Amino acid sequence: MESLLQHLERFSELLAVSRTTHVSPWDPATVRRALQWARYLRHVHSRFGRHVRIRTALERRLQKRWRQEGTSGSFPVPGLTNFQALGRCDLLLSLRLLENRALGDAAYHYLLQQLFPGPGVPDADEETLQGSLVRLARRRSAVHMLRFTGYGENSVLEDSVLKTQAELLLQRLREVPKAEGEGPSRFLSALWDRLPQNNFLKVIAAALLLPPSSPRPQGEELELGTPKTPGQGGQELVRWLLAKSDVMAAFCHNLPVGLLTSVAGRHPELSRAYLGLLTDWGRHLRYDLEKGTWVGAESQHASWEELYGRFQSLCQAPPPLKDEVLTALESCKAQDGDFQVPGLSIWTDLLLALGRGS
Amino acid sequence: MQKLSVWDQASTLETQQDTCLHLPRFQEFLRQVYEVLKEMDSNTIIERFPTIGQLLAKTCWNPFILAFDESQKILIWCLCCLINKEPQNSEESKLNSWTRGLLSHILSAFRFDTKEVGLFTQGLGFAPADYCPGLLKNMVLSLVSELRENHLNGFNTQRRMVPEKIRFLSRVCIPLVTLPDIEPLVEALLIYHGHEPQEVLWPEFFDAVNEAFLLKKISLPISAVVCLWLRHLPSLEKATLHLFDKLISSQRNFLRRIECFLKDSLLPEAACHPAIFRIVDEMFRYALLETDGAPEVLAAIQVFTRCFVEALEKKNKQLKFTFKTYFPYASPSLVMMLLQHPKEIPQELWHQPLKHISEMLREMVEDQTHGSYGGPFECWFLFVHFGGWADIAAEQLVMSEAEPPEALLWLLAFSYSPRDRSLQRAQTMTEVKAVLGHLKKLFRSPTLSAKDLQAAAAESQARDPRPPLCQKLIRRLILNFLLWAPGGHVIAREVITLMAPTDELTHEMTGLLDQTLYRWDHLCMEAPKSRKLARELLEELCLAGTAC
């Protein structure tokens, strides 16, 4: 067991190195050894896939290592992040070496010979490395060719990219060990700090809207030993959002109105928080007698249009969300004094504008 | 090769649609290129084919070629040939560098993510190789749901796909047809009905899908295949011809195998749609005429009809289309008669439907004024679909103790020799009746010998020699006799050797035995001794001759 873990460590290092200029002194023999190691680990993956103890041990070691890499300042290029990745480690290694210009000619030539032996090998077996590489190339050109079809300019691609990112996020969330109670939250917070936030918000929304059946891990069947239920990833996200008010604020502020309504419709806890936020925004607006509209006291406050736009969208949602929203508005209006005349309470005005004022 | 090189350079410069037309040939060309290149080293290649670099580079940048079948693989092989293990000078180094760039491009080209997305995926620990399959799957799903929405809601949907976009999509799918990830999209396109009067999909798309389907490189549900064949007639014709090739090959195909081929081809199931049935039937008719009634074609028609009827019954208990739509030239009552399952009628009563069928056919054939039923050939062609009845008639005649009914004699004579005039047919019937008479006497004889049988079947010297088809019929009756008579198994081999001295006749015998066993299986007939004998004989004949 220990030797296996060591082997894993050494290979992870190797994988990290394979992207750098450190490969320039490599000769064909080194390449051969590297490929052999990869093949060995792949064999480990297929042999011990169902062996829970070994699998867990390997996975734990990999995750620990990955997180270590992750917390160090700059952005490392990830290597093996979980047990599943072992099934593709030879593919990962090969791709990195192929793209590495620093690899010497002789070593590169040897690599090509190993990876692409030519027509002699029966390629019907999908497991061969040649088959995987070639299939990847084919899939990439497929993505490229399909991108310009569909409704709107690039929307097939954009939506799919978002959805794919969402699936990846949920997959990682599933893997974060629950033993350390705060695991998922810390993980998400770390991501929030490091990654481009606008994109992250969109991905979260997409993840929250994924169909309740489990988004499958990339390219492989749902494996044994994943006791977590599918919807749990989504639950973690919601929990985290509710806990982090700054993220929640950004979420509600930056995303398109219709998207927010959809998310609120799906997740009742979020709809409550969303409504809370909106009422908060509402309270910051003052009526400007001269202009005849509601304005924010400071520039960062939401405007009347933004507030109205969101409420309008929410009122077009199916019940129970719609009813919830209207009830909330009514009660705010009542709290304010139940004015019927415009200009006194923002809630009255909103209801009037929405056509629900009585 | 130089000439080809020039031609293909031009073709890669052309627009996408022309590229699509040439994709399979280009792949072959690439294969040939590789065969040549692999024998040489890098420097020789550049000397001999200075333009090879340009050719390969242009190919690398063409996504259609990279997406097609195995072209990307062969291209990679070609490029590998250009890599120099130990470059001696800067020229060679540059070539290496350039080639590596191309290889890199093939494997990691077409960036489809923005910088933000790249950071996100990296931050989660995924490389493009990890999520590319998932991305493709999501794109396909998205397109499929758009197509479905379009299909269901037509003008009401906000996300409406314009016909041009759908046509574009079909063109883009042509090279991708054999990629399993694309199957749902191909299916959705086939099933999609626009609201435009003309066909919106590219014809080459149908061709490509059909080819892939026939070569089993794509698996489609029957509904999609039916759509394909209904929308694109050449595909249906090609599929039927492909089937014919398999069925009517030089080696003998046993009926069981024919049934497998047929079911595999999905044609019987698809034929539940009358338009498809009519076209396939037409092609069978043509084949029959061309081969002048070859027994392989007859067998194929029979098995096809059986599979077709089976599929039809499975589909819906109440038929969507009446039988008239499938057999427009036939009398409906005759069709209903023929469609009856002998299994559902007790064996003792089989002579009843046989008699009815015979009478109906006879009426149609002999009555010259009944033009609407197409004449003798059409009647015979219809009957041939349900050839099992003739086999049953032949068996009944031998097995029953009674006087052979006129109707059955006529039926058999007609089925073997439809072109006879009434006089000839009457003669045949008389001959057969005579032979049957002899056979009946011998049926329960305890001391049966081959000579006896020979005598029974002998032609009378007085009359004209029997026409070949009549001889064939008599051989059949003798075979049935051997299988059913209590003393038959003793003399069977001897008789057969006498009856079938040539390869051709042995071929005929094996065909009859195979047909008989096949029929008994489907009728669930209990006949252990006869079955055993038939099976043994079949095996022996197969081993002995070149008939199998």
Image: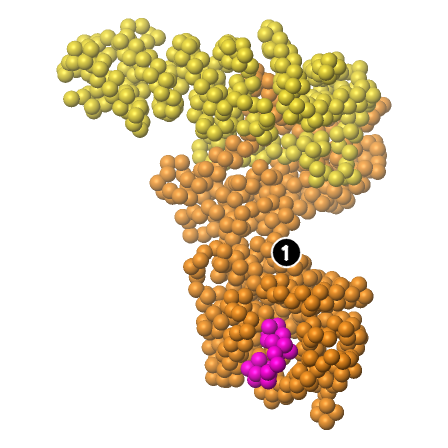
Chain colours: A yellow, B orange
Q: Position of residue B537 (x, y in %)?
A: 75, 67
Image quarter where the C terminus of chain B lies is bottom right
Q: Main secondary structure of the magenta part?
A: helix
Confirm whether residue A20 shows in the render: no
Say what amino acid the circle numbered 1 marks.
Answer: Cys
Image quarter where the N terminus of chain B lies is top right
Please determine whether, in this image, residue A59 is positioned above or below residue B248. Answer: above
To which chain does the residue with label 1 belong? B
Q: Position of residue A314 (x, y in %)?
A: 31, 23
Left or right of residue B318, residue B33 in this image: right
Residue toward you, B514 or B423: B514
In the picture of the structure, the residue carrying the numbered disc 1 is B260
Residue toward you, B196 or B19: B196
Left or right of residue A135, residue A255 in this image: left
Please determine whether, in this image, residue A212 is positioned above or below residue B230. Answer: above
Q: Residue furthest bottom?
A: B462
At 46% from the left edge and 46% from the top edge, which residue is drawn? B192
Q: Residues within 10 Å of mark 1 (few under 14, many from 20)?
A: few
Residue A292: which quarter of the image?
A: top left
Membership of A306 in magenta stretch: no
At 70% from the left edge and 29% from the top edge, which residue is drawn? B103
Membership of B402 in magenta stretch: yes
Q: Position of residue A97 (x, y in %)?
A: 72, 21
* Residue stretch in magenta: B390-410
At 31% from the left edge and 28% from the top edge, which residue is drawn? A318
Confirm whether residue A68 shows in the render: yes
Q: Position of residue A164 (x, y in %)?
A: 52, 26
Q: Judging from the image, what secondary structure is the residue with disc 1 in?
A: helix
At 49% from the left edge and 71% from the top edge, which residue is drawn? B337
Residue A104: which quarter of the image?
A: top right
